[in-house]
Image (tube, rainbow, N blue to C red):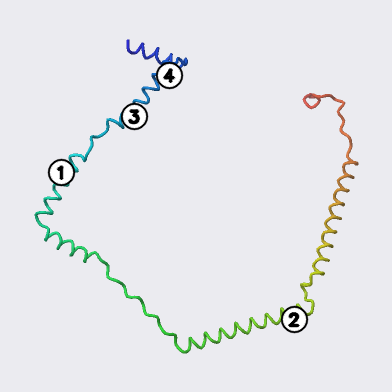
Amino acid sequence: WLAKSSRSFIGDLLNGDRTAVGVATALALLVVTLPLFCGRGRGPSKKTAQKKEKKGAKAQAAPEAASQKQSAAAKAEEPEPLKKPSKKKATPDELAAKKVEQERRRKQSLEAQEKNMQKQKAGGAGGNSFDAKMAKERAKAAEDEAAEMFKKAQERMQKKDAAPVSTSAGRFALLEDD
């Protein structure tokens, strides 16, 4: 009887019968919410209570012994602080080498600055003036435009020279084997 009724219920559910869908929804809701309401009882479990009782008994039995053990264990676990290595003072030779290197770099920088100043005054190889740059830019734009016009003309000529396609064989001419 139960198997027969479950088959008919599933059939009604698949056919979209409203009562069957409602019952299925209620069952699903019950299955989801039942564990929330009927979960574990309030308060800690028996094992947790037993553990707390044991800890309390140990603490009352030997509070002094436990504190001594903890302090000894804490001292043993603490790492010894490492001494920072002291900074070594540079030897006179190292200081002299460092000063020579600084002086060399400073002279090199000054020479580079002087060269740049001379290039700017003379007009330089880079042409740093604004007018020269603008003239180069205009020439480049004109050259690009001329190249683009040439390509378009070449394409027009190729289209004009292309032979017309013959379509007199019909739509299915490619499929025939003659």
Foreground: disc 1 or disc 3: 3
* Disc number placed over residue 118 in the picture, else none: 2
Q: Earlier in the sequence, mark 4 or mark 1?
A: 4
Mark 1 element type: helix
Q: Are marks 1 and 2 in contact (CB under 8 Å)?
A: no
Frontmost residue, 63 versus 74 = 63
Q: Earlier in the sequence, mark 3 or mark 4?
A: 4
Foreground: disc 4 or disc 2: 4
* Disc number placed over residue 41 in the picture, else none: none
Quadrant occupied by the C terminus = top right
- Where residue 114 appears, as percent x and y from the top left, is 70, 82
Q: Are marks 3 and 4 in contact (CB under 8 Å)?
A: no
Residue labelled with disc 4: 21
Frontmost residue, 118 versus 38 = 38
What's the CA distance linking mark 3 and mark 4? 18 Å
What's the CA distance linking mark 1 and mark 2? 92 Å
Above or below 129: residue 21: above
Relative side of 82 to 131, left or right: left
Q: Earlier in the sequence, mark 1 or mark 3?
A: 3
Amino acid of disc 2: Gln
Write down the quadrant of residue 2 in the picture: top left
What's the CA distance linking mark 4 and mark 1? 49 Å
Q: Residues within 10 Å of mark 1 (few under 14, many from 20)?
A: few
Amino acid of disc 1: Gln
Relative side of 51 to 19, left or right: left
What's the CA distance linking mark 4 and mark 2? 92 Å
Mark 4 element type: helix
Write down the quadrant of residue 24 in the picture: top left
Residue labelled with disc 1: 50
